[in-house]
Image (cartoon, helix red, strand yellow):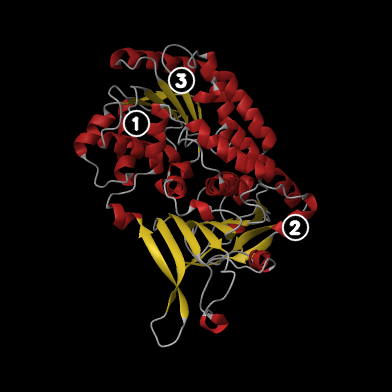
Amino acid sequence: YRVAEPALMVIFGATGDLSGRKLLPALYNLAKQRLLPAGFAVVGAAIDDLTDDAFRKRASEKISTFSRTQPADPQVLQSFLDAVFYVKVDFSKLDDFKTLARKLDELDHARHVGGNRVFYCATPPPTYETITEHLKAAGLNAGEGYHRIVIEKPFGTDFKSARELNHIVQRVFHEDSVYRIDHYLGKETVQNIMAFRFANTIFEPVWNCHFIDSVQITAAEEIGVENRGAYYDKAGAMRDIVQNHALQLLALTAMEPPIAFEANAVRDEKVKVLRAIRPIADDEVAKATVRGQYASGWVLGDHVHGYREEPNVAAGTLTETFVALRLFIDNWRWAGVRFYIRAGKRMPKRVTEIRVLFNRPPHLTFGRQAAQELDPNAITLRIQPEEGISLKFGAKVPAAGIRLRSVAMDFLYASSFLVEVPEAYERLLLDCMIGDPTLFTRADEVEAAWTLVDPIEAAWRDGRPPLQMYQAGGWGPAAAAKLLEADGREWHRP
């Protein structure tokens, strides 16, 4: 029922990390599931001087190493590689784009794809402007068939640059043809937030300020900045995780039911949530936000360097590797409910989850003594790893007299469906070819998120609140715990 038309996909930056680890393996797995349209071909475009065969060999190695399904199926792999081509493109040279245009025309006639093109920018953000301008100059954004462009996050570095980037891209491609990719939205578990809320009758009636006390969103990683030091030092955790992934999770958790699971309906509701988040006033930033940076410590039994000792990181840098925020959504459903976000690197483990904490019962029927081991009800949506949903509720301990304790009811993807969960990029690349932008970010969503983030970043540049160090392998600086203690709450330990 969802069939993609034949198309050519051009991957700019095809020899880079994202292409090798994610895009080529995802396309191979789509081929393996017979989801790629007939006539589909990939054209790699990068600065390296490679022949088709040299690029195919490279693609083959990457797919064999990074594919979700192992080992690679030799027949599927060979037939996929036969449809892989390469053109050397220096993004600053218009002539190279004209060469690319000739190659695409040639493939178009040979493979009967009707002019359909997807341009994927797997390149650093500063190149987006040059690439889109040159696509236009080479006439690659017009003609028969569809012409779509896929752009990776970050979309700009603040509201002003995001708006400029939107204008630049929209001068060349219509907004409906611009696919801003946030791979979190391609994760099955993230899409399941909507299924959990809107396909069931028992949760939505209590999904509001009358029953919910607070919501905690955690996006923790045990890794450091790896080989992304130069990029990360300019971005920091706020721009790298909070502005996109964490706020998307918040929007899906808090949005009103859309009239249909359809691109505009879903994205309209998400934008409403982002616009309803109460802006943090300049004098409140020090009280409502925490920023930290990891020092050396122990993670999963290994001793690791502090952030300032990482390669390509400026000496004495004040870039944050941990963020905690307290937010409010000023609308009817969420009035007064606290939303806490924390995101950081070099935490004790890799975990992304949304924890919805409910109010305590209005009356202690069984008395204080019996309920002392009882926690409030909670629903935890585990996005990764151990994907699933857990419901915490009170039960009587089997013993004489009344003693209550919290127990958990768990749903796990792996054991319930007994199928391997597809990679986020598989879903998103296919959606782009089908022309379904539901799981991609719209221009106004990006701008709404930056509107919230910019004033916080401005106060941080003034040193409010000061940057706090935390030991690698811990759950962030002490101020993060104090942020919740001030509200009489504490972070959930995943």
Which numbered mark, 1 or 2, is in the foreground of this view? 2
**Label 2: element kind:** helix
Q: Quadrant of the N terminus?
A: top left
Residue type at mark 3: give it. His
The residue where tag 1 is placed is 55
Q: CA distance from mark 1 to mark 3?
A: 24 Å
Drawn side of residue 51 relative to residue 444, left or right: left
Instruction: Measuring from the top left, give residue 95's x and y in whole percent.
Output: 50, 15
Marked residue nearer the N-terminal end (1 or 2): 1
Residue 410, visible in the rendered structure: yes
Q: CA distance from mark 3 to mark 2?
A: 46 Å
Q: Quadrant of residue 107?
A: top left
The residue where tag 2 is placed is 286
Instruction: Measuring from the top left, give residue 82's x and y in whole percent.
Output: 26, 27
The residue where tag 3 is placed is 147
Q: Quadrant of residue 129?
A: top right
Instruction: Measuring from the top left, give residue 463's x and y in whole percent.
Output: 76, 55
Q: Do the CB atoms of the residues marked 1 and 3 lie less than 8 Å apart?
A: no
Looking at the picture, does residue 359 appear above or below residue 109? below
The residue closer to the viewer here, 47 or 183, is: 183
Marked residue nearer the N-terminal end (3 or 2): 3
Residue type at mark 1: give it. Phe
What residue is drawn where x is 39% and y is 26%? 9
Which residue in the rendered view is the most extreme toward the bottom?
A: 400
Q: Quadrant of residue 325?
A: bottom right
Label 2 neighbour load within 10 Å: few <14, some 14-19, many 20+: some
Q: Do the CB atoms of the residues marked 3 and 2 lie less than 8 Å apart?
A: no
Residue type at mark 2: give it. Ala
